[in-house]
Image (tube, rainbow, N blue to C red):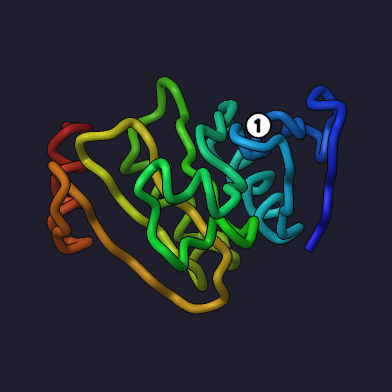
Amino acid sequence: MMHVYPPDGATFLSPHFRRREFICPCCGLLDLDATLLCGLELLRVLIGSPINASSGYRCEKHNLRVGGYVRSRHLAGQAVDAIIVGVPRIRVVEAAESIYYFSHGGIGVYPDSPHVHLDVRGQRARWGYLDGNTITYDEAMQMLRDEAA
């Protein structure tokens, strides 16, 4: 775990990611698991496009405000909601599945949202979420396949 504290959001944490992409928007603090950053760098290389971290670390207050899961991996700095503009999400998920950190972590697919949830929890977890309801990962993946066709 990397503990990064204020102030400079412009600081690069890795070749392609800055601190400001992962900080909690509520308090400005950041705890970040280095394996998440490593996995994101590998994903960036595989897909060949920039990754926007729309939600990274969350403090408990912010997690509650956004309706996050009580044991969200965002709270431990082990998760990111990633948006990759111009790349079909099915391709993003398939590439993430090929990266050890994510294939042995969590991947959440939200067909009605532009992001894909990726985490490095250390055990495989897959889910889908649509219109405020849980759906199977397979259903969510089929929707992404249909979207890309």
Q: Position of residue 61 (x, y in %)?
A: 53, 48
Q: Position of residue 56 (x, y in %)?
A: 58, 43
Q: Position of residue 89 (x, y in %)?
A: 34, 38
Front residue of 136/143: it is: 136
Q: Secondary structure at mark 1?
A: helix
Q: Position of residue 58 (x, y in %)?
A: 57, 47
From this viewpoint, which residue is outermost toward the bottom? 123
- Taking the spot 52% from the left edge, 62% from the top edge, the residue there is 73
Residue position marked by numbered label 1 in the rendering: 21
- Taking the spot 18% from the left edge, 61% from the top edge, the residue there is 138
Q: Amino acid at mark 1?
A: Glu
Q: Is residue 132 above or below residue 89?
A: below
Looking at the figure, which quarter contains the N terminus? bottom right
- Taking the spot 79% from the left edge, 26% from the top edge, the residue there is 9
Looking at the figure, which quarter contains the C terminus? top left
- Taking the spot 38% from the left edge, 37% from the top edge, the residue there is 115
Q: Quadrant of residue 6?
A: top right
